[in-house]
Image: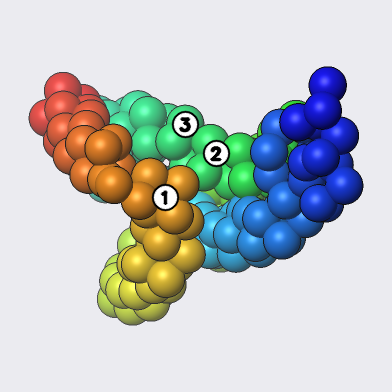
Amino acid sequence: GTCIREGERQGQRQDGASKEEKKRLGRVGMLTGLAIAIHNFPEGMAAFLAVLGDPQAGISLAVAVAIHNVPEGMVIAFPIAISTGSKWRGWAYGACAGLMEPIGALVAWGALGDRTENRLMFGIIFGIVAGMMVAVCLMEVLPTAFNYDPEDKWVTKGIVLGLLIMAAGTIAF
């Protein structure tokens, strides 16, 4: 009733996200999506190279990549969905970033075939992309997380849980 009308008058929707918050979340989603898409392209190349070098290791890498793609997609989709009010748009942005991996694998296959002598180039690309991902996490994702949990009741626990999930996935596969 009254609270909802008051919030709408102040520029807020019923879900509590103000226009400024939506704009900021849209920016976070777009920057994160761009960084993850750029990260996924050489990751697809690496998966292709891993299969060439050792098919069993390549399968393990593919499973580990699939596991970590779920939270990557979520960190893109949630801010976009809140920003735009469209769950489907959030899903589409996450899916587009995820599609960069098979595209990277196809490009590697087309460029290299079964040759692997350009491994240094992939190391350099991965180093650059890793720096970009760390920058996005430190400058956008973590500040946004702490903005929504200023007393840090859950963010640090979430970080630790994420690290544990990735470690378990790496060990298991």
Query: Where residue 42 appears, x then y in whole percent?
Result: 46, 60
Horizontal arrangement in the rendering, residue 5 relative to residue 34 (left or right):
right
- In which quarter of the view is residue 134 placed? bottom left
**Pointer 3: what residue?**
70
Image quadrant for the N terminus? top right
Query: Where residue 164 appears, x then y in whole percent?
Result: 16, 33
Residue 127 shows in the view: yes
**Pointer 1: what residue?**
145
Residue type pointed to by label 1: Ala
Q: Name which of mark 1 and mark 3 comes first in the sequence.
A: 3
Q: Residues within 10 Å of mark 3 (few under 14, many from 20)?
A: few
Horizontal arrangement in the rendering, residue 94 relative to residue 8 (left or right):
left
- In which quarter of the view is residue 165 placed? top left
Cα distance between the residues tagged 3 and 2: 5 Å
Q: Residue at x 81, y 51 (%)?
A: 10
* In this rendering, the label closer to the viewer, 1 or 3: 1
Query: Where residue 125 appears, x then y in whole percent?
Result: 40, 73
Viewer-proximal residue among 19 and 110? 19
Using the image, tell me which numbered label, if any, was put on residue 73: 2
Relative height, residue 29 to residue 79 (above, below): below
Viewer-proximal residue among 129 and 13? 13
